[in-house]
Structures are given as structure tokens and as C-alpha cells.
Amino acid sequence: MGSIAITLEEKGIPTVMIYNERHEKRFMGTVLSRGYVDYPGINFNEYDTFTSEGVRALAPEAFKFLVKGLTTWKPEYMKPEGKKWVPVEDTFTYTSGSQEETLDRFNSSYLEMGWGDGLPLMPPTRARVDALLKGTPLAPSTVIGKWGPPKADFTVEKIAVVAAMAGAKPEYMPVIIAALEAITSQPWDAYFPVMRSAVPLVIVNGPYAREIGINSSANAFGPNSKYHANGSIGRAINLAMNVIPGNGRGLKPSNLAGNPAAYAGIVIAEAEGVASLAKGWDPVSVQLGYPAGTNLVTVLGIDQMAMSIAGTTANAAAAIAPNKDIWPRSQKIWEAQYAGVLAVTEMHSVTDGQMGGRTKADYARELWEKARLPNDKFAGLVLTNEFGQPMEASGFIKQLLEEPDVIEKGVPVAAGPDKFLVLVTGGH
Amino acid sequence: MKKILLLLTAVFVLPAVLTVWVMPASAADYPLTVLNPQGPVDRGKELAPRLDSLEGKRIAMWLSATPDQLFAGKGTELFDRLEKMLRDAYPGIEIVPYGDLPMKFAPENEVVEKIVAARPDGVVAGFGG
């Protein structure tokens, strides 16, 4: 479908597409993969297209859009400059008879332009952004990465603007920048984010986490009035992923139910002071090969979370369900992909050596052994085409299914135990 | 006495005048200037040139599925309505009705060929189920 529209465009015939949002994944996957980032497609909530009343209601908007799409189409709020679309306005000014009203106008306007998460935004004034820029030695024009469907420039300046909107402090900037550097180092997947609800899990190791007040104790995954950094940094990262690529096509909201962690993110520090007390409980930074005490920001895309799992690792393993859409398509990805993170919160148990004498590596191995899918269920989940029809295994998946260990115990969710990160955080 | 009056004026009247002067008097008194968060983005490949107007143009309405499939059967209803709105807004417009084109999306070459053969200046496509 998208492919036909693009073929017509390439034959010199302008097109415009009206579709319901259920098809965003298939449509955008086709358009983006052919190098077009600003195709005029308008999608509607599928429930609005199922009734005559809904169709009548959306017709005026569809009409306005199709006229624009066939005539004056260009990305909103952008103008061409060389090989780029650049923002038309560098600043926006809002006025009213009261401070409260002015603030409301700013918030409403930014949301209308697609720049926000629905929660109130702090105004990114020049003074506030300048203050944030003092939190990093990098020049404002530094591009730390290019990302998103239109390969947006993530400059330090734009990151500071978004960080201001999220209510961040200058000292949070190095963590926000490092996390976004990690995120933008990976290619934006033109296809799967639409059908996933993944959010970045940001793990901060090293003394800087404690210095700026990233919570690694009570309620580390949730709000804690003593700690401002976790939520603010997480919100800045998620807003940046959504807003900076902009162009009407930032990180599109998931077509599934979404993930509440996309509001404030998931940012935690590891309780290194506790973990290092026990042998075999080195922090994640050491597990990843860095010297102890290194300030390190590690990011993983997380689309499932199970909280407060009590009991055995089997309970934790049961919460790790393979997802067809993210099952690796090549051996290289299979060997590189992390299966998940186990956050152990019983700090006193680690300290007192009451974890049954087990190390992080022991936990990771137990998880890897137990988080397996019976071979027949694996075939039903992964070895099917988009219409649900069975497919033959091929490539590395075929080899994997022929391994004696896999035949006997089922398919593991990761290439090895080292593809689980175990960390210590949270209260007791 | 004059000195006392001057002093009273200084103490009571001037602050009152200054207060009135600095108090907001219009809706423009609480401005807020904020920075644009959006970054520059790559333009990607260029789409076909857009039309100067739809007036006098030949526009094809193409539905990628049969009426019972598209928008749960409401696709034709939407496109009939859009066609009427186009004719009302642009009296000189020429419409290629969706019934004259394949209401499917495969095989792709065949569908493209038939749409191109209808010689449209632009295409309004509908996609959804």
C-alpha cells in the first residue's frame, strides 16, 4: 500500500493517504524504508472510522488534509535549508494578562505542535537553557547523534531545551547526554517501535549518580520526594526521543496499550556501596568490563516489566516472555541482544550474605536456564508469517533448534547467561 | 507647611503613582519567550511536485480494499463524502471514481499500471481495515 503510493510519487503523481492508525506500522515501515520521511499520510483512530457518525465527523479534517497533501504539502513548522528541514521559528513568545494564563498558553501551544507528553512542561527559556548548558563541557552545537525516522540532529542545545521542559537541573545533563548518545548510536527501527511499547531503562553506575542524587534506595523505580533526578532525567530522555525528531513523526506512540514508564522514564542508580560488600556482586559497570568506580550510563530497551516478584528465580523467569516482533532475525543480533535485567532489591540480604551464597552470575544463569520456551510453543510464536501461517526454520534459528540442549530443555530467550544484567537497587 | 506637604506627597502620592505605573494594564504584560525544541532533520527523498491547485485537475480516488474491508465498510462512505466536498470546493475538478480503479493492493504492478492509465494529476488513497 505505502509501496504503491511511493511508486506513484516516483512516477511524478502526487498522492495522499488516508488510513486508520492500526496500519501505521505497515504503512510507515514501507514509506520510511524507501527514504521518504515526510509523506502526507493522515491516520485516524480506528474506532472513529467504523461508524457513519465517525466518518461524518472526520471528513472535514480528512478533506482539509488531502487538499494540503496534494498542493502545499511540507512538514509543519519546518522550512527547507540545504539537505535539511529546519525549524521555521527559533523561539515562540506567548502573552496574556496573567502569568498563569501565559504558562497555560505555552503548554497548550507546545502540545498542539506535538511537543510534550501531556504533563505540564516547564518553559524552556533562554536563561533556563543557558543554565543547563553550564552542566556540560560540550559546545551547544555538538551533535551527539542522529536519530529517528528523519535522522534528526540531537544537538546539545536541543537536548538542553528538552531537559528544561522536563524540569532537569544542570548537573543532570551529563547523564541525559550519555543516555541519548547510547540511544542514538543504535539505528532507529522504522518498523517495530510502532508495535512495541519499549522505553529505555537507564542504569547509572559510579560516584556521579550519588553526587547528583539519583535514587538507588527506597522506591528507586518510583517517586521519592528526596530524589528528583530519576524522574526528571527519565522524562528528559523520553521527551527528547519524541520531540527532537519532530517533523510530525517523532517516536510514534505505540499502537498497543503503551507504557506508563514513557512519562518519567526508568532511570535508576545501582546501590554499589551495598553490592560491593559481597563477593560476586560487582556493579553492572564491572560486569560490562569497566573498572570499579567508573561513571557509566547503560541503556536497554525494555518493553515488559514485572515488579515485586517474590520467591524463586522461576517466578522471575516466568515473567520473561519472548515476543515475536523482537525475536532476533540474525545470529549477530541474537548474540548481542540482552534478554533483560533482574533488579535485586533485598539490599540487607546482600549485605548479610543471606542470598543463599549466590552471586549475580548465579542468578543470571538460573534465569537463563529457566526462562525457556518449549519448542512447540516457540514454533507457534516465532515460526509463523504475518498471517499466522507456519514457516520452516532457517538460518541460525534452524541451527539453534538442532542444539541438543535446546531439544532437551526448550529455546532460551538469550544466547547466554551473560545476556542478563543483574543489579542491586531499591529499598529493603 | 510646604515642606510637610511635599513630604506627604513623596510618602503617599508618588508610591501610589509608581504602583499604578508598573501594574499590568494590558494583556501583553506577561510575555514568555521559549526556545524551539525541534532539531534539524534530513529531508530524505523528494516527493513528486505538488499541484498549484486542485481546480481543473484530474484526481483519482483509490481504495486499496473492497468496501466491506475498508474502514469496516465505511471506506466508500468516507470517499463519497470527500468526492462531494472536492466537487463543491473545486467546480472544475475531474474525479476518477474509486469504482473505475482496482479496489485492491496486489499485484502491485498491475494496480499501479491501472492507476497511471487513468492519467490522474493526483491520487487520494484510502487504506485500512
Image (tube, coloured by chain):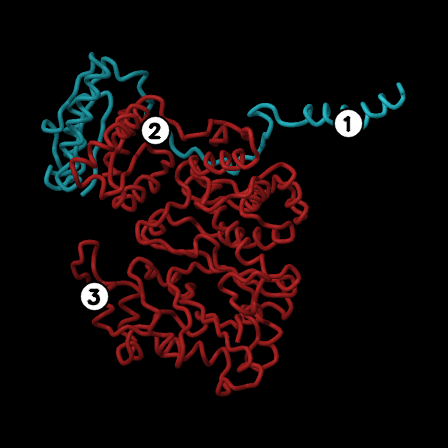
Chain colours: A red, B cyan
Left or right of residue A24, residue A269 in this image: right
Q: Which residue is labeled 1 in the image?
A: B12
- Point out residue A283 in the picture as x, y percentages from the top left corner: 57, 72
Q: What residue type is labelled 1?
A: Phe
Q: What element carries label 2?
A: loop
Q: Which residue is labeled 2 in the image?
A: B47
CB contact under 8 Å: marks 2 and 3: no
Residue A302 drawn above or below residue A86: below
Q: Residue at x 75, y 27 (%)?
A: B15
Q: What residue type is labelled 3?
A: Gly
Left or right of residue A365, residue A153 in this image: right
Quarter of the image for the N terminus of chain A: give it: top left
Q: How far apart are marks 3 and 1 (CA)?
A: 86 Å
Q: Could you say which is closer to the camera, residue B96 or residue B19?
A: B19
Select label 3 or label 1 by which is in front.
Answer: 1
Q: Which amino acid does label 2 sit on?
A: Leu
Q: Which residue is labeled 3 in the image?
A: A380
Q: Choose top left, top right, bottom left or bottom right for residue A269.
A: bottom right
Give the chain letter at badge 2.
B
- Point out residue B21 in the picture as x, y percentages from the top left corner: 69, 23
